[in-house]
Image: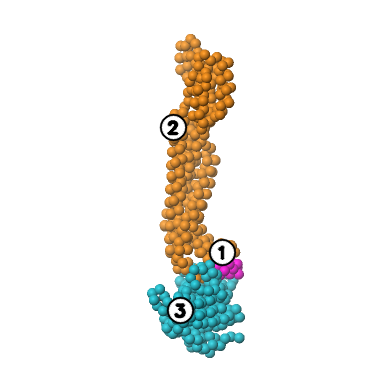
Chain colours: A orange, B cyan
Amino acid sequence: MKVFFYNLGYFILEAFRTIRFHPLSNLFSFLGTGFILFLFGLVLTGWAVGDELVGALEQEAQVSAYFADQVGEAGAKQIITKMKTLDGVWEARYVTAGEAYAKNRELLGNEAEILRLFDNNPFEAFVEIKIDLNKMDQVLSQISSMKGIEYVRDNRDILEKLKGIVDAIKLLGGVIAAAVGITTLVIISHMIRQGIYHNKEQINTLRLLGAPNSFIAFPFVMAGLLLTLLGGGLAAALIIVMMNQGYQSIGEYIMFLPLPPAQELCRFIVAIILGISAALGLVGSLFGVSSIQKEG
Amino acid sequence: MIEANDVALTYSDGTKALKNVNLKIGPGELVYITGHSGSGKTSLLKLLMGIEFPSSGKLTVLGQRMKKGNDRKLRKLRRKIGPVFQEFKLIERRTALENVMIGMRILGIPPRKMKQEAMEALKKVGLEHKLHTPVEHLSWGEAQRVAIARAVVRKPALLIADEPTGNLDHNNALNILHILNSFRDEKTAVIITTHATHLIEGQDATYIRVQEGEITIEQRRVAG
Ligand SMILES: Nc1ncnc2c1ncn2[C@@H]1O[C@H](COP(=O)(O)OP(=O)(O)OP(=O)(O)O)[C@@H](O)[C@H]1O
Ligand SMILES: [Mg+2]
């Protein structure tokens, strides 16, 4: 420990020396890890946006249930009370025929004139149910088998498609995360190995003077960590630029997308990138320095 | 400090570098090892530093049985040794000062004390004007003196110098021997190999002659 503290300055200097010794290949290591981590950041952004989207849609997951003809208003209210006790039902609200009429007129806007063609209100009363999407199947079958319910309309198709997309993004994210991890580890451990190889003589001398492996390895681990962190910094900077430039325009382009707040998301992704780059740098360097031990 | 019983060293290619080495060196002893080129002087020192291990026999250095395997104990032992290698083994692209300090860093000496003592050691070997010169710009003899400073500055229990006078002129060689000898005290043994027999005659020292891998202790006057 004492050795470590007294020599911190030396270790840092040695780490920079290791990096400077192969400026070009280390520049590429830096750019390589930077771009890989940027890619990772992009996937992470997609992931976050997708997740937010599904979350929002899940909140709005609504089904409408229509009553059988013979059920009057009182009967309907009874059914609704029962419905509310079902597991997976968040809310059930009675919508009167008049309300349904008003709602549809609003939806139709200019076309609302068409409603004048009807003598009577063509809409029926129904019940608006908010459900837990994760219990969708169970809830739907329970509702449709209730006495007095004739027909249930859900937007299951859309929801399932969306879920599919998000799952795909998550899978892709997992694959890319694995690729990022492996590639960064390979780049960094290779860079460390190269450094160790070119400093064979120095390492041997340190050994002969009684240096423990940790003393020999430390500057290399630091160099690896520094390089990946720089790569992480580059990736983070690119993400910040992209968020500032691109994010808003996506938001304007597809207005209905409920985007997570840019600032928060940006901070979250930058933190993750830096954290991951530090972890990868450390592990990669430790892989790299393990070659010191092998040389007796 | 050092005890060898019937130690032999055979290199992996079959070269029998040392045979039947029986030796006992105590603290405060000054030992000169002489012998023709290729006789086995460096090989003997390599055994003492755990760079090579006895093919047979028993060797103990500073209480540590020398055999392959125990890296941790070996490193600990090496930290108590101040080695001057025949080919110096200085670290390139580092200054003379940094080279001297590196041996001390491993020992965990506080930075300020380390720097001061390293500068003093370099001054002792007459290199106070080369502190910040990268070692590859030094002359052969200067580099050798840096190697010596690096060894003595560690205040080792065992100072081992392989041909420390090999590349020095008469005066510098005497100076170096004087410096190395000055480290011999009740706790430190000093072991020096040299071809310069004329510089070491008639001292209060142990003289070991190596001939084709066999040693004879030619004169022995243990210091009081
Ligand atoms: N690693 C090795 N593998 C095989 N043979 C070796 C090895 N190192 C030394 N030798 C041989 O062992 C013998 C003794 O070598 P050593 O280096 O001990 O000689 P020396 O007395 O130090 O010579 P010099 O005065 O030239 O330094 C020589 O024949 C040498 O060729
Ligand atoms: Mg030799």
Which span is picked out in magenta? B101-114
Determine contact: label 3, label 2, CB under 8 Å. Answer: no
Q: Is the magenta stretch mostly helix, strand or loop?
A: helix
Mark 1 residue's CB less than 8 Å from ligand 2: no
Say which amino acid is labelled 2: Lys
Residue A68 in the image: x percent, y percent?
50, 16
Residue A161: which disc?
A: 2
How many C-alpha atoms fall within 10 Å of the one at disc 1: few (<14), some, or many (≥20)?
Answer: many
Between B170 and B103, the one lying in front of the other is B103
Q: Please report whichever mark, 2 or 1, sits nearer to the chain's N-terminal start.
A: 1
Q: What residue type is labelled 3?
A: Ala
Q: Can residue A108 be seen in this view?
A: yes
Does the stretch in magenta take in B113? yes
Tell me the chain of label 2: A
Outermost residue, left side: B13
Where residue A201 sits: x, y (%)? 45, 68
Q: What label does residue A168 carry, if any?
A: none
Residue in the picture at 50% in, 86% down? B217
Quarter of the figure with the N terminus of chain A = bottom right
Q: Name the residue under label 1.
A: A7
Circles 2 and 1 in contact, beta carbons < 8 Å: no
Q: Is residue A52 on the magenta stretch?
A: no
Mark linked to residue B8: 3
Q: Which amino acid does label 1 sit on?
A: Asn
Q: Which residue is drawn at 60% across and 67% down?
A: B110
